[in-house]
Image (cartoon, coloured by chain):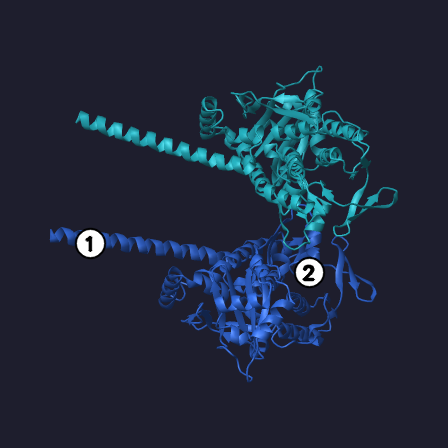
Chain colours: A blue, B cyan
Amino acid sequence: MVGSLAALNFARKGYEVDLYEYRQDIRTAELVQGRSINLALSQRGRKALAEVGLEDEVLSTAIPMRGRMLHDVKGNTSIVLYDPCTKQCLYSVGRKHLNEVLLNAGEKFPNIHHHFEHKLSSVNFNEGSMRFKRPFQEDAEAKADLIVGCDGAFSAVRQQMIKKYGFNFSQEYIEHGYLELCIPAKNNEFQMPANYLHIWPRDTFMMIALPNQDKSFTVTLSMPFKVFADIKTPKDLLEFFIKYYIDALPLLGEEKLIKDFFKSKPQYLLSIKCNPYHFESKAVLLGDAAHAMVPYYGQGMNAGMEDCSLLFSIISQTEITLDKALLQFTESRWRDAHAICDLAMYNYVEMRDLTKRVTFKCRKFLDTTLFRFFPTIWVPLYNSVSFTSMPYNKCIANRKWQDKILRNIFYTILSGALVTATALYVTNL
Amino acid sequence: MVGSLAALNFARKGYEVDLYEYRQDIRTAELVQGRSINLALSQRGRKALAEVGLEDEVLSTAIPMRGRMLHDVKGNTSIVLYDPCTKQCLYSVGRKHLNEVLLNAGEKFPNIHHHFEHKLSSVNFNEGSMRFKRPFQEDAEAKADLIVGCDGAFSAVRQQMIKKYGFNFSQEYIEHGYLELCIPAKNNEFQMPANYLHIWPRDTFMMIALPNQDKSFTVTLSMPFKVFADIKTPKDLLEFFIKYYIDALPLLGEEKLIKDFFKSKPQYLLSIKCNPYHFESKAVLLGDAAHAMVPYYGQGMNAGMEDCSLLFSIISQTEITLDKALLQFTESRWRDAHAICDLAMYNYVEMRDLTKRVTFKCRKFLDTTLFRFFPTIWVPLYNSVSFTSMPYNKCIANRKWQDKILRNIFYTILSGALVTATALYVTNL
């Protein structure tokens, strides 16, 4: 997606763009009902899509999610709206649909050339040369003035950058894996309220569900690998769901759940940070290749799209050379990218654990109340991340400032109460 | 070095060992006077060498360093002994000499087979196969039950591990580079006292010197790349040395300094952490390949050699399978390896900056005094790292406990003083 979006941006500026994709054309691939992975599109992604004139087309088929619907262990639900004040929401969009929109838009440009089933096997930045493996065909070779690596968390372009002096890099796997399940449509209707991101927080693990266009929900079960490993038989699985996800069980369907659960293995999740994102004027990394993150802030795609917004706003400056533009991109971006990787890791804890706690609910209430009265001053962290284009690092700084204010208010009230109590006590003496 | 040491350990257990080295045989390479990079050997390295019967041979030609000799900006010196109580010291050993001792020892084993000028180009863990590039010859291929990657900070074996799910990894470059200079012998004598590690701390940069067998000193200049870049001409260089290293200038010799400085570029320094160190029963990383660190604690080589001690103490357990032994190695080692990487980074600050401060000197005095009275209880951090085999992570925990005690003593004395002062004041009223 980020590759297609970057291609559109370059093409609009008049560059010749060759777009290489390792998989086949997603538009001709078969769609399995309920397995269409969906993504939460928010402000940053919308802005980047708007810049290439595609926001409306993408939103026209997206499903708005107005808040979190929390499911407790007994099956009771409660709602926490994302934005009770200005009513902003996330949009559940199908990965396939989004890709289709971007690829179709690219085909309208004569200067974008698509190459599917080309897997990058080696790259030489100084020569600008690349080699691709193709199924049942000879290797392909290509040359470029600039190589843009939008090739995901396991980026082959980045693999080459790691060998360069001064390239800082980390990859960190979390001890939790994820597995996708499906709540199918029933009588052509959603089986749960559609306009929410459904969460079943269970302390050390959790389950979430996002609505699809076909009225199914894609369900993601996240838990430690060892918990997955302990579920060995259909009996184990049903007992586990009866204990933790009683309300979801009839919606998933016992037979379908057993089939879906045992047919695939839990997948790994990792966080990737690096710095710089570029090599001289020869190569640059965007999206997951630059900053893969765990999926719990719903910002992976949005951050990748925002990379495009930033990069092209820099390149559009008059008289900037490419090497300076790429350096400026790295310097403007790395702190924010690291910040959202950290926030995503933190939100994993919040989603599965904190959402249940009273202190979290109190804070949410305070945040919402202050946001209502001071909508331009008091933007809660989740809202600044999801519904503004405030740099991620600024969002965190903002939150720290809010924490400080609240702490001060708390102590002021506490000491006020103590003084009053003492005064009353003395008066009564 | 770690590779040769590991080979000796395996050979002593009766395994067939093939030792592949990318460079030529160091024993036949030419030695340039004063360019023999030297290393600080301490307890952990000595223990590992003793286990293969080589400690005495290595120490026989090593130069003991009893403490730090600090050179201030005016050229005045002061001494901080490493261990005024039990007189332990570091040993400056030549890298070449140490390699020679290890390789010669290896040649006595018919089950160690040396292969020089073999550069690993690809590796397949599941098949246990490797491919090596050789100068002016066809590629070589080899198979092994276990591949032991002792191939340094830019390890080709690790490059393959990075692609495995669950492999956590980070590489972090520091903003300082280093460049080696030489203080040659004069009239076949050392130009400075030989039995010290000489340090010129200058806040944001520093210079150190270690003695060589040939009575020269290898001098390492560490500073930010941008400071290096600002020294463009011989005039700049001499002005810089007159300002910061006035006493070293005549020892280095102006002409030789200019030649040495401008003939090479400053080198990068990086810190590498990973976890796990093994892949099933097929491969394991040791030394810099597993945990490269900045050189400021003098523990890089010692930690690598200690890897061998630990690995072979685990493998020597009766009835342990190789996969379990490697898993146990990872689990026993990673926290300590991460800890020494962090300590090395911290010591970089201490060496160039803190050694000059009064608070640092006070702490050093307190530590030394307490160590003198309670030599088994109060072992200062530097001493536990350099002169014991206490796990690195334990050394840090120990230091935190000492910090806490000292803080409590400080506050007790402070409050005692306040109480006494108040009492005296009241008495005088």
Q: Residue at x 76, y 56 (%)?
A: A122
User: Outermost residue toward the right?
Assistant: B137
Q: Evaluate whether residue A286 shows in this view.
A: no
Which residue is more in the foreground, A216 or A310? Answer: A216
Do the CB atoms of the residues marked 2 and 1 lie less than 8 Å apart?
Answer: no
Q: Amino acid at mark 2?
A: Val
Q: Is residue B141 above or below residue A261?
A: above
Tag 1 subunit:
A
Of badges 2 and 1, nearer the viewer stands 1
Q: Amino acid at mark 1?
A: Ala
The x and y percentages for residue B383 are 54, 28
User: Outermost residue toward the bottom?
Assistant: A187
The x and y percentages for residue A216 are 56, 77
Residue assigned mark 2: A148
User: Outermost residue toward the left?
Assistant: A429
The x and y percentages for residue B423 are 22, 28
Q: Element type at marker 2?
A: strand
Which residue is more in the foreground, B197 or B274? Answer: B274
Instruction: Locate residue B262 relative to residue B139 in the image: left or right.
Output: left
**Structural crowding at the residue carrying mark 1, measured as other residues with C-alpha within 10 Å and reported as few (<14), some (14–19) or many (≥20):** few
Q: Element type at marker 1?
A: helix
Which residue is more in the foreground, B223 or A340? Answer: A340
The x and y percentages for residue A39 are 57, 69
Please identify the quarter of the rendering in which residue A59 is found. bottom right
> Quadrant location of the C terminus of chain B?
top left
Q: Residue at x 49, y 26 (%)?
A: B376
Q: Residue at x 64, y 29 (%)?
A: B47
Residue assigned mark 1: A421
**Structural crowding at the residue carrying mark 2, measured as other residues with C-alpha within 10 Å and reported as few (<14), some (14–19) or many (≥20):** some
Please identify the quarter of the rendering in which residue A293 is found. bottom right
Q: Earlier in the sequence, mark 2 or mark 1?
A: 2
Q: Evaluate whether residue A68 shows in this view.
A: yes
